[in-house]
Image (spheres, rainbow, N blue to C red):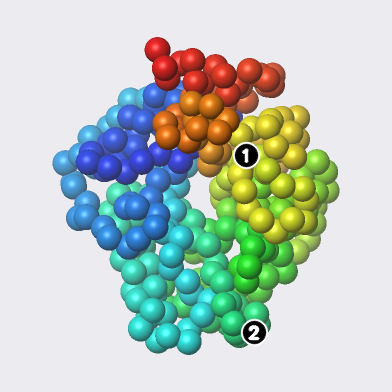
Amino acid sequence: MIIGSHVSFGQNGLKGSVEEALSYGANTFMFYTGAPQNTIRKNIDIKTTKEAWELMHQNGIDINNVICHAPYIVNLANNTDDAKYNFSITFLKSEINRCAELGIKYLVLHPGSSVGIERNIALNNIAFALNKIIAENKDVTILLETMAGKGTELGCTLEEIKYLIDNVQLKDKIGVCLDTCHLNDAGYDMANFSEFLNTFASVIGLNYIKCIHINDSKNPRSSHKDRHANIGFGTLGFDTIYNIINNSALKDIPKILETPYIGDTDDDKNRLYPPYKFEIAMLKKGEFNPNLLADIRTFYKK
């Protein structure tokens, strides 16, 4: 099982990310090269990056399974403000360069939101931008994330993802990141995941799947809300998620948890604890722990 979670990329850069992933019992991870809410980025530290590579090698983490995520605020779909649109393109070019410098092969990207323009025009804007961004001389693949369809989000149907892939020139530099919460909220039945994969294979092709975000959902199918829940505590449920993770067609695909941090109580969010160590252990064991949230609080309060 290739499984990990979102981790931070702080003072020690990639080395800190590796150390955090190992503390969760993970053998892969996903990170942002800065805060996901902004585009402020520091230069890559070569010394700590080399130390991170060595640490991964020592602990059996294959760097080819490690995922980077682009910040949420870039939007390639709407070009009504030329300055913002061109900045998004320039910034994502620099993110590809940063990934290449770190030795990371995959960069997950939210396709974007139309925000007042026609969806077909917005899709063409994304495709145009991707063709400007994707670099032939960089071993970095952009993974379009399947979205929940909140507001004017693009990429909430397989047909929209296919349209983008069809209009990208360098097909070997484009892929897909599935998100189980987003797919559920977009209207796809995760309880019949094998059937969904058959549909994906016929519409897009399974070879394009390079990563899966593993999240339960706080909302029913087709809600278009995008609110993640902890594993087994949402509308998908533990068995559905466990079956997705263990689907033989996706055996070699990295699975990344983005589930919510846990507060001291259900209503108190002043102190938040990462759930990943416990969720990864639960998924490896294959048995739902109904006391998971309490166990996490007890562990971090010691």
The numbered mark at residue 263 is: none
- What is the number of the mark on residue 118? 2
Q: Which residue is mark 1?
A: 229
| Residue drawn 78% across the image and 51% down it | 221
| Comes first in the chain, label 2 or label 1 | 2
Q: Residues within 10 Å of mark 1 (few under 14, many from 20)?
A: many
How many labels sit on residues? Answer: 2
Residue 264: percent from left, percent from top? 48, 26
Q: Nearer the viewer, residue 158 or 2?
A: 158
Which amino acid type is shown beneath numbered disc 2? Glu
Residue 128 percent across, percent down from the top left: 50, 81
In the rendered view of the protein, which quadrant contains the C terminus? Answer: top left
- Looking at this view, name the residue that lies furthest to the left: 47
SS category of the residue bearing label 1? strand
Residue type for callout 1: Ala
Residues marked 2 and 1 touching at CB (< 8 Å): no
Residue 239, given in percent of the width and then of the height, sits at: 75, 30
